[in-house]
Image (cartoon, helix red, strand yellow):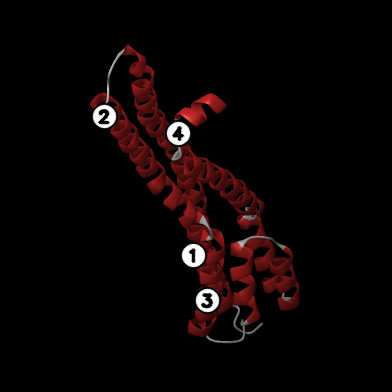
Amino acid sequence: MLRIFVLGGPVMIPLLLCSIFAVAIGIERLWYLLRSRIDTDDLLEDIKLSLGQGKVLEAMQIAKKSRGPVAAVLAAGIAHYDQNRAEIKEHMTVVGQEEIHKMERRLGALDLIVTISPLLGILGTVTGIIDSFNVLGALEGVTQASALSVGIAEALITTAAGLIVAVPTMILASYLNSIVTNQVADMSKKSTELLNVLDAGSDF
């Protein structure tokens, strides 16, 4: 493995850094997003039950004790239950945007790694081919064939390394983005349901 890394040339160093960052960001984001996933249907039912009994404080405590963006948005709505629908919705929207920002944090870095890793591989390919042509230009005998093979190896290895970093990172980024998308859709749905409950029970 070390021999392959050395044969790849200096471009392998930034590619290695890209792979380390991708793994670190992926693990952190997976932990954060999966940890925040809860059964929001049960959460909303518990909140509805408390609100139906006029126990607004209890409904607030249920929402605040739960993890995740949906719970945070519902808590924001309950906190302003005595305002009109438009004002409640505005408060929930503000909190929702904050939660989306938290979920999308560092996902842009994964997209950047997906973009630059193949480009770094291509850069290594170009430099390897340049080295090969330099050897060909100065070729004086069979003894120079090994130098020519080094340039070709650098050209091929960096291209492969760039794709090896980019493809799994792209899959990971796509999976994380799908989690965020589902969470955002769930936030929107549960927010509307809570607004309807608060409208129906405006005399809490």
Give the residue at mark 3: 94
Q: Residues within 10 Å of mark 2 (few under 14, many from 20)?
A: some
Give the residue at mark 4: 164
Q: Residues within 10 Å of mark 4 (few under 14, many from 20)?
A: some
Of labels 3 and 2, earlier in sequence is 3
Asked if one can make out residue 71 in the rendered structure from this viewpoint, the answer is yes
Of labels 4 and 2, earlier in sequence is 2
Dot 4: what SS? Answer: helix
Q: CA distance from mark 3 to mark 1?
A: 12 Å
Residue 26 versus residue 53: which sits nearer the camera? Answer: 26
Give the residue at mark 1: 188
Residue 79 versus residue 104: which sits nearer the camera? Answer: 104
Measured along the vertical axis of the image, is residue 204 above or below residue 175?
below
Give the residue at mark 2: 133
Callout in the foreground (3, 1): 3
Of labels 3 and 1, earlier in sequence is 3
Contact, CB < 8 Å: mark 3 with mark 1? no
Q: Callout 1, which amino acid?
A: Ser
Of labels 4 and 3, earlier in sequence is 3
